[in-house]
Amino acid sequence: MMRKVKDYILFTIAVLLLAGCVKNDLPYPTIVGEINEFALQGQTQMKIDKATGTIAVKVADSLDLANLRIEKLVVTDGMTVIPDEEACLDFAHFPDTGFIHVDSLPPTADTRMNFKKPVSFILRLYQDYPWKVTVEHDIQQRVTVKNQLGSALIDKNTHNVIIYVDSLLQPSLRNIEIETLSLGGSTATVMPDPKSVADFTRPRTFLFTAFGETEEWTVSVAYPPAGMSFTSVSAWAKHACVMGNTRTGMVSARYRMKQEVETKADTNDHWENVLSSEIDIDEAGNFTLVFTHLQPGKVYEYELTVDGVTEDVKTFETELIQLIPNLSLDDWYKDGKSWYANLDLGPDNYFWDSGNKGSNAVGEANPTSPETSDVVRGKAARLESKTVAGVFAAGSLYTGTFGKVEGLSGASLNFGRPYTGRPSALKGYYKYNSGVIDKTKAPYLDLAGRRDSCHIYMALFSGWTAPFLVNTNTGTFVDLTWNNENLVAFGQLIQGETVKDYTQFRINLEYRDQTTKPTYILIVASASKYGDFFTGSTSSVLLLDELELVFE
């Protein structure tokens, strides 16, 4: 018996020693859990920040945050979705995988959640990746009173509002007439009734109630301090916008380049009057007027008259025109097997890139290359979609750099270059052969047999401090909709027919507003619009030449 026990102990020790010598040389792969697409019922804005694992959403103010349905949740392939149990209205029936649309789920699925507080998600494969979703109402807040000067100052953090009124037209603060008081959303009730409150010799408190919750706001009416201005100016390279508010609709202005040395000849003849067609006034009395035909990098002075009152002469300086390297597409550089649309790859000239580096990993394909014979002037860019090692590769050109090959067929790209200018348009020349789509991949399988389209677009972004990391393998792309709060301006050209001869194009940029300045520029051209999704025609060829930024 003792011998058997002894033998068992020795056997156990041997097994343990052997186990200690076994080394796991097959570590789990690193697959980062990300939410790539997200949509809520009634959303008006949405921003995904993959660096911090957060999503910020705004929804219509008529919706109850305690009962909102998630309509799209696209995550990294293979991830298990673990929702916030406390926030789920039906945790047992919340899907444990991502979904492209709520209608694709079984009838028993329930994606409703309470978003009154930030909601957490865990994406799980080999490890956990936490995400947080914050939702708030998209409330269009507005406060106006009779004889008001400028726009109300609304502090969303302290719930304080300050309104300035004209002391001549409104000599007493005891008979203020409230015209608009919208602070709590379209469904909120207000106490007391704004029509019953007229005495603003002291701040007044209003209670806004919606969805069972009440917010307290303090509204103050005052006369403006001496010298306070209610207008602002945004100077571009060749024009400037002045914004303000008018009670009567009577707005006029004149402007001129500021003289370095004042002379007797500096008379009223130097002033340029703003035309009535260059002044826009909305229903609320907010106006925008434009000074045109300005010169870049110059100091101008202007005199503004609003509601019969002429302000002191003020000055502004126009922006310098900021160009980017090799817009002519005449400069090309070959590094190893790959062509680049740059003079060289030094920091001053390396502005453009393509998918060549990835396509040339197994040979020398160069879907993007210099064109020397069929050009407008000098050289042109030839973007030719083709199959490389069995994978569809669209001819492309973009401001940024190629990252690396991702997976079996994907790639990472660094989109965008630092830029602070504000052009009005992108123009150039192009030719295009639109082939029949013979390569497809989900979700564009239904495009097979249709004509391919080329795609040229330009976008400006604010708030970017680094290029945007595109990953075609995970489906991570730049959001080019106005839901992206970083998007300052956007314009595009999509052509689905063959263009046999060089044709001039002009892509006008639509700006979010007149004041926000960009930090990055993104220009992208592709012979196949859905090339990022490995869909297009191997016969599509886009020739691009003599690009130019327009400043007006």
Image: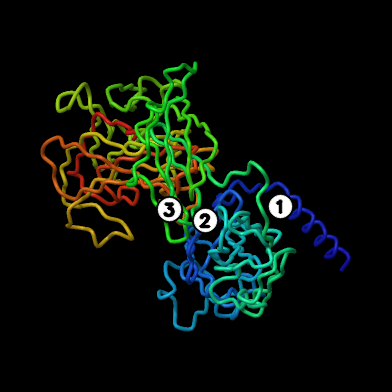
Give, as a three-letter code, the residue at label 1.
Ala
Give, as a three-letter code, the residue at label 2.
Lys
Q: Residue 232, position in %: x, y?
A: 53, 43
Q: CA distance from mark 2 to mark 1?
A: 49 Å
Say which label, 2 or 1, has the lower sequence index. 1
Give the vertical position of 500 relative to 81 (above or below): above
- Residue 390 makes an appearance in the image: no
Describe the element under mark 1 as helix, strand or loop: helix
Give the vertical position of 64 relative to 18 (above or below): below
Say which label, 2 or 3, has the lower sequence index. 2
533 with respect to 537 (left or right): right
552 with respect to 19 (left or right): left
Describe the element under mark 2 as helix, strand or loop: strand
Image-quadrant location for residue 65: bottom right
Image-quadrant location for residue 403: top left
Residue at image point 40% right, 51% down: 480
Q: Which residue is disc 2 drawn over?
A: 47
Q: Residue 261, position in %: x, y?
A: 49, 16
Q: Which residue is disc 3 drawn over?
A: 475
Q: Nearer the viewer, mark 2 or mark 3?
A: 2
Q: Which residue is disc 1 drawn over?
A: 19
Q: What color scheme is it?
A: rainbow
Near-viewer residue (456 or 505): 505
Residue at image point 54% right, 52% down: 31
